[in-house]
Image: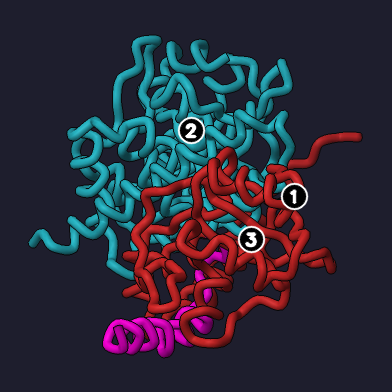
Chain colours: A red, B cyan
C-alpha cells in the first residue's frame, strides 16, 4: 500500500477544524464562572499507583466505616456523605487515607478481603461489590468531626476530586455549596 | 539522516522541532515517532524554493507533490513547518511547489531571544523552554495530549533549572492569558488521562507509573509558574 501524505491544503483544513473545536472547548470552559479559580487547584491523585489499594468489603459499609473511625481520613464520596448527608457516586464504596498498619488491621479483623492494587476506579462502568479504596498516606490534612470521623478539609477535597475525576465544575459547585458550610456547622457545634 | 541535513547548506535554515526536537532538549524523553519536523522561515522558503528543492533532492529526499513533506531513501519523512519573521498569523506560506503551513505561535516564539540552541552535532533546535512552550500551546485534536505530556515531562526534567523556568515563563507571557489558561487546562486533562490509564494498568506498567508521576510533577510546577507570572507585572 502506498503511503499518501496529506497535502498542505488538507492539513490547513484539518487545522482549521481543530481550531474550531478548541474555540468551542475554550468557550465551554469559560461558561463556568469557576474556570479561572479552579485552574489554581493542584490535582491530588487519590488513586496513585503504588499508594492506592482496593479491597472488597466483608461487612456492611457502615460497619467498616465505624470500625475505621479515627483511623482513616475519609475523602471523596465517603467524606461528602458523612459531612453533608449525601454523596455523588452510585457505587457504595469507602474512600480514605490510612496507614498500611490500619489497612492490615482491617483485613485481620475480617472487615475486608485481601487488598489488591489493580483495577482501581471510583466510578466503575460495571456493578461490583462495595470496596474500600485506601490511599496509604498518613500525613493528610484532616478535620475531626464530633462523631470522631476524620475527613479532609474542603480545599483538599477539591484537589482529590480534580485528581480523581478530572475537572468537574458542576460537581465542585455543588460540593462547595454544602461541604465547607457543613464543616463550619460541625465546628461550631463542637 | 538528521546529521546529513544539518551539515548541508540547508542546515542553517532548519530548526529541529516537534517530537524530534526532543533530541535536542532531552536525553531521557522519547520522541515517540521517527518522523522529523523541522521549522523553516516560510518567507525564505518561498524566495528560495528552487534552491530548497535542489538541496533536498541532493540529500536523497523526494518531495511529495502539494505537500511540505519530503520522503527519505530510508523511509523517514521530513516535514517542513513554517514560521515567519514578518507576521505572527496563521497562513499557508512557502512557495507554489512547496506550500508550508505557517503558525503564528511559532513565529512569536522564534522571534524571542534564546528560542533556539546550536546542537553539538551541528544545526539548530528549539531551546528546551521554547520546545516546551510550543508543545503546551500546540493545537490539534489527534495526538494533542501527547504534545502536552511531552511538555510536562520537559518541565519535570528541568524542575530545578531556574534559567529554563524563567525562559518558559517569559515565552508563555508572549501570549494572551486565555491561551495560557487553555494550555494549562489541556495539560491538566492530559495528565489526568494518564493517571487514569496507570491505575488500570498491571504491574508490568511500572515505568508508566513513574512517567505519570513525572507528569504530575510537571503540572504542579507549571501551575506554580503560571500563578507566579500572574503576580508579576
> Which residue extends farthest right?
A1
Quadrant of image for the C terminus of chain B: bottom left
Q: Is residue B82 above or below residue A26?
A: above
Left or right, A140 with respect to A12, comes to left
Tell me if residue A176 is in the magenta stretch. Answer: yes
Q: What label sits on residue B194 in the rendered view? A: none
Marks 1 and 3 close (CB-CB < 8 Å): no
* Quarter of the view holding residue B185: bottom left
Q: Left or right of A185: which side holds A22?
A: right
Viewer-side residue, B15 vs B48: B15
**Residue B65 appears in view:** yes
Q: Which residues are magenta?
A: A164-190
Quick one: quadrant of the N terminus of chain B?
top right
Answer above or below: position of A126 versus B15: below
Compute the Cα span from label 1 to label 3: 37 Å
Distance in Å between CA atoms under marks 2 and 1 = 41 Å
- Main SS class of the magenta portion in the image: helix
As drawn, the label of residue A14 is 3
Disc 3 crowd rating (10 Å Cα; few below 14, some 14-19, many 20+) is some
| Residue to which mark 1 is pinned | A119
Question: Which residue sits at x=64%, y=51%?
Answer: A106
Tag 1, which chain?
A: A
The furthest residue to the front: A109
B170 over A71 or under it: above or below: above
Q: Which mark is residue B38?
A: 2
| Gap between marks 2 and 3 measured at Cα | 20 Å
- Element at badge 3? helix
Amino acid at each position: 500500500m502506498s503511503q499518501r501524505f496529506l497535502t498542505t491544503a488538507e492539513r490547513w483544513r484539518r487545522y482549521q477544524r481543530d481550531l474550531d473545536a478548541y474555540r468551542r472547548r475554550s468557550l465551554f470552559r469559560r461558561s463556568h464562572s469557576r474556570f479561572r479559580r479552579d485552574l489554581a487547584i493542584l490535582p491530588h491523585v487519590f488513586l496513585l499507583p503504588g499508594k492506592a489499594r482496593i479491597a472488597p468489603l466483608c461487612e456492611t459499609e457502615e460497619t467498616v466505616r465505624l470500625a475505621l473511625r479515627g483511623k482513616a481520613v475519609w475523602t471523596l464520596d465517603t467524606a461528602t456523605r458523612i459531612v453533608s448527608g449525601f454523596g455523588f457516586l452510585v457505587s457504595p464504596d469507602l474512600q480514605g487515607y490510612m496507614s498500611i498498619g490500619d489497612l492490615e488491621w482491617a483485613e485481620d479483623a475480617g472487615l475486608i478481603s485481601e487488598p489488591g492494587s489493580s483495577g482501581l476506579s471510583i466510578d466503575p462502568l460495571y456493578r461490583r461489590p462495595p470496596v474500600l479504596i485506601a490511599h496509604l498516606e498518613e500525613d493528610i490534612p484532616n478535620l475531626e468531626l464530633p462523631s470522631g470521623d476524620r475527613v479532609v478539609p474542603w480545599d483538599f477535597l477539591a484537589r482529590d476530586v480534580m485528581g480523581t475525576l478530572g475537572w468537574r465544575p458542576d460537581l465542585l459547585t455543588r460540593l462547595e455549596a454544602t461541604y465547607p458550610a457543613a464543616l463550619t456547622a460541625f465546628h461550631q457545634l463542637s | 539522516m538528521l546529521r546529513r541535513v544539518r551539515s548541508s547548506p540547508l542546515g542553517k535554515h532548519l530548526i529541529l522541532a516537534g517530537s524530534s526536537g526532543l533530541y535536542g532538549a532531552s536525553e531521557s524523553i522519547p520522541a515517540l515517532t521517527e518522523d522529523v519536523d523541522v521549522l523553516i522561515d516560510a518567507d525564505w522558503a518561498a524566495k528560495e524554493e528552487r534552491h530548497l528543492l535542489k538541496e533536498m533532492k541532493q540529500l536523497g529526499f523526494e518531495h511529495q507533490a502539494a505537500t511540505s513533506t519530503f520522503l527519505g531513501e530510508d523511509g523517514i519523512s521530513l516535514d517542513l513547518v513554517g514560521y515567519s519573521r514578518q507576521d505572527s498569523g496563521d497562513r499557508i506560506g512557502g512557495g507554489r511547489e512547496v506550500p508550508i503551513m505557517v503558525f503564528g505561535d511559532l513565529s512569536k516564539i522564534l522571534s524571542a531571544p534564546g528560542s533556539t540552541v546550536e546542537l553539538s552535532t551541528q544545526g539548530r533546535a528549539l531551546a528546551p523552554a521554547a520546545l516546551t512552550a510550543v508543545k503546551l500551546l500546540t493545537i490539534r485534536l489527534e495526538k494533542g495530549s501527547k504534545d502536552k505530556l511531552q511538555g510536562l515531562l520537559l518541565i519535570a526534567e528541568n524542575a530545578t533549572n531556574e534559567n529554563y523556568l524563567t525562559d518558559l515563563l517569559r515565552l508563555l507571557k508572549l501570549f494572551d492569558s486565555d491561551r495560557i489558561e487553555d494550555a494549562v487546562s489541556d495539560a491538566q486533562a492530559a495528565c489526568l488521562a494518564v493517571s487514569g490509564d496507570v491505575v488500570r494498568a498491571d504491574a508490568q506498567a511500572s515505568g508508566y507509573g513513574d512517567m505519570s508521576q513525572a507528569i504530575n510533577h510537571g503540572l504542579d510546577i507549571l501551575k506554580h509558574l503560571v500563578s507566579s507570572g500572574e503576580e508579576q507585572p
